[in-house]
Image (cartoon, rainbow, N blue to C red):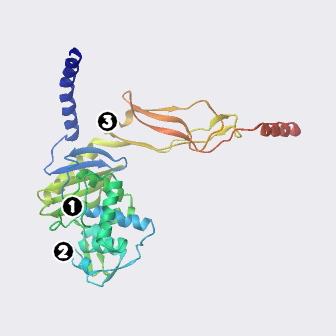
Amino acid sequence: MKKFFAVFLVLALVLPTLVVGACAKETPFDLACSSAVLMEASTGEILYAKNAEEALPPASVTKVMTLLLVMEAIAAGKVSMEDSVSVSERAASMGGSQIYLKVGETMPLSDLLKSVVIASANDAAVALAEHVAGSEEAFVAQMNARAAELSMTSTHFENTNGLDDTVTNHLTSAKDIAVMSRELIKYPQILEYSSTWMDTIRDGAFTLTNTNRLVRFYPGATGLKTGSTAKAKFCISATAERDGVSLIAVIMGAATRDERNAQAKKLLDYGFASYGVYRDEERVLAPLAVQGGVKDTLALSVSPFHTVLSKEKLKGVTVTVELPEVVKAPVAEGDAIGRVVYTLDGKVIGESPILAAEAVDKISFFEILRRLLGAVSIS
């Protein structure tokens, strides 16, 4: 009983501290929206979260996943930017934001892609989905499968564009939007389109205007996708880059477009003012001595290390290289030989393995003899 009460007393003292600490970390300030996330794109680290995993209607921010699958299909060689896409009756019937596609009209895939990214065209999104997967239904199945691969646990898609007047379970979360946005911006073509304020299609006859006003008015803005419906209210996944720091700010359920934009700017301002990325990119290590190998030295490789830190901590990182003086053969390429350890204020904040960049076989008796005989003959 004494042990039980001792444990109970410790928990009673510690748990409130843990809860308060977690809440303080999650919400350093409040935002006028249903949920929000700020993510640093190169590391995937979340810097701010409000109701981050709550499943909510995303409106046209849905198209982040649509665009991701199209870009992955292009990268895999399944479709091409130069493809001529024929418009179906289903695609032409889409309402909301659109480029007014006609049944049977053909358009280059690149123009449809640009129309989705810049103008959030619902009809273009369906046309792309049908071209990639054969039908919108098949494409939506791929969207949900890809969401599962990315561990987007609060997400279920029912269509490609986010129109939600007839859906029953078309939902995602701010965290999941940040995750899929991070994947999408790995494609430079997307950022080229999403940072464009105005463009045209149909040989200049139809003007596209970016639905994301931050691209025009926020320094460093690069995209990415807006959305709004009566159910979803106003949503955005906003990307921006300054001084080598790339941020993704997600706002869901803001009351108005201006409020959505203001909250996104507030998140981005907070991120750029508070955080930086510590990078150890190209660490070169001298070859390591090898004992009993066909070679006397071993080439080494170490992966780049990135982590997000508060700006005042960036110059306080200590780097320690842990390596043996010599390694015994045989060594296989990719074998772990040592590690680079990164510490801050006496605490380890990360490490990178040091690997063998080549294989070194164990030297045989006959090879030793051959070398000895060669040395004697030379002398």
Indicate the quadrant where residue 359 lies: top right
Task: State the image coordinates of residue 338 (x, y, percent, origin top left).
Answer: 53, 34
Q: Residue at x 22, y 45 (%)?
A: 49
Of discs 1 and 2, which sits in the foreground? 1
Outermost residue on the bottom side: it is: 104
User: Is residue 195 visible in this depiction of the protein?
Assistant: no
Numbered mark located on residue 88 in the image: none
Helix, strand or loop status at disc 3: helix
Q: Residue at x 29, y 61 (%)?
A: 64
- Quadrant containing the C terminus is top right
Of discs 3 and 2, which sits in the foreground? 2
Q: Which residue is mark 1?
A: 170
User: Is residue 88 visible in this depiction of the protein?
Assistant: yes
Q: Residue at x 53, y 39 (%)?
A: 354
Dot 1 and dot 2 residues touching (CB under 8 Å): no
Q: Is residue 144 above or below residue 351?
A: below
For badge 2, the amino acid type reads: Gly
Task: State the image coordinates of residue 369 (x, y, percent, origin top left).
Answer: 82, 37
- Count of numbered circles in the view: 3
For badge 3, the amino acid type reads: Glu
